[in-house]
Amino acid sequence: MHLTREEEGILAGEEGRGRQKAMELVVALGDIYNAKRLIPVASAQVSGASFKTVGDAGIKFIEDFSSRARVSVRASLNPLGMDEKRWREMGVTSAFQKKQARIVAAYQAMGIELLYTCAPYLAGNRPRNGQHVAWAESSATVFANSYLGARTNREGGPSALAAAVVGKTAEYGLHLDESRKPRIRIEFEEIPEGLVPLAGYLVGKIAGKRVPYVEGVRLTADEHKSFGAAMAATGAVSLYVYPAPGKKKVDMSMIEECVSLPRSELMSCADDLRGDDSWDLVAIGCPHCSPSELKGMARFLKDRKPSKECDVWFCTSRKTYASCPKEVAVLRKFGKVLCDTCMVVAPIEDMYTRSASDSGKAMVYLPTLGKQRASFRTTGQLLEAISR
Ligand code: F3S
């Protein structure tokens, strides 16, 4: 891979051990994927923030990195394992909180913006069409590539961190036009109300690592958020392509398979993931709720009363929470409006065993990372269930 004189210098340690280590990582990835050069990134999004997912070994790595390096581009952080202010109310232990605080302090010392959200594009870190970025969170990556038109690979936590430090990433994968061409065409007959997350769930399963071209979907920005998150969880999809007015013509020359998905396929997926009705937690907000989602739910609930004998979590970013005080007040009558965290990266397995969610991504991770017996319901069904 070609390196400029400045990049060579960083690699040789001329700018300190921290930048050298970061450059080593970026270059190693470039070599593995046969990149020809490094390119500047406009921002980074760093995952590996929850103590639950990084563990003690992760703390050591982050503290070590943090003692020697600072970020050189805008970088924001994924959700933590707890709400920073209301962790006691969640049932998080003080031992967990102490470890979590060490992780936060290390990232903060590096200059990383403590947004604690998987939807940084709703909290100020929103790349423009065509910009190269280095994002790690899978749901954010697929949204950035597919909806915002930015370019990023699905980075790992350490590689996003390294890119944030050197301000560059290796030019391979989804940074290149060639890799962004769809390889499979998936056509939906119709997506029943509330089942967009399961449409994404099926796309990921079918597409696997391939870029899908998806037809028959007309989605709002919020729906793109949950659609992409689900396919990034069931498959390794970090970009999907779809027809939209004003969008440039898609190069279909690499399509190798066409699949039609009738309405019945989505209904049977919903049936398969239905589980049962006995939940001890209803969890909404994977990915983190947007202001319009909080508003829609508050509108529905405002004249109703809580009904279900189970806890309810509405997960969002602190920025969105602060921007919707009236809606938060309504939702708080029905459950906890949690910031900085979510039902997957919080230690939910120590608190609950049976949870329901409206998220296709959560249907993958609640049973695995969260050790839950998980039930899928649409947002509307969950709101009906928790109110009367
Ligand atoms: Fe976000 Fe947690 Fe879901 S990080 S995408 S809410 S698993």
Image: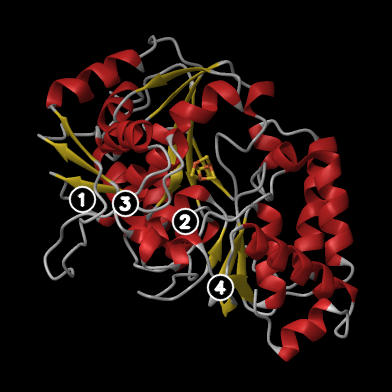
Q: What x and y, as percent, mark residue 170?
A: 60, 69
**Residue 263 place in picture, x, y as percent:** 13, 26
Find out whether the residues at labels 4 and 2 contact each other: C-beta distance under 8 Å.
no
* Residue 69 seen by the camera: no
3 and 4 marks in contact (CB < 8 Å) = no
Mark yes or no: residue 44 visible: yes
In terms of depth relative to the viewer, which is nearer, 354 or 216?
Answer: 216
Q: Nearer the viewer, mark 1 or mark 2?
A: 2
Instruction: Decide: is 292 above or below 188.
Output: below
Q: Residue at left 71%, top 56%?
A: 158
Cα–Cα span, label 3 and label 4: 21 Å
Compared to residue 244, the image places residue 377 above or below, namely above
Q: Which residue is mark 2?
A: 141
What distance separates the C-alpha of mark 4 from that of mark 1?
26 Å
Between disc 4 and disc 2, whose residue precedes? 4
Q: In this figure, which residue is indicated by the disc labeled 3? A: 240
Left or right of residue 125: residue 17: right
* Residue 176 locus on image (x, y percent): 43, 68
User: Which amino acid does the dot numbered 3 rest on?
Assistant: Tyr
Query: What distance separates the C-alpha of mark 3 from that of mark 2?
Result: 11 Å
Disc on the earlier residue, 3 or 4: 4
Mark 4: secondary structure = strand
Residue that carries the numbered disc 1 in the rendered image: 219
**Callout 1–callout 2 Cβ contact below 8 Å:** no
Residue position for label 4: 43
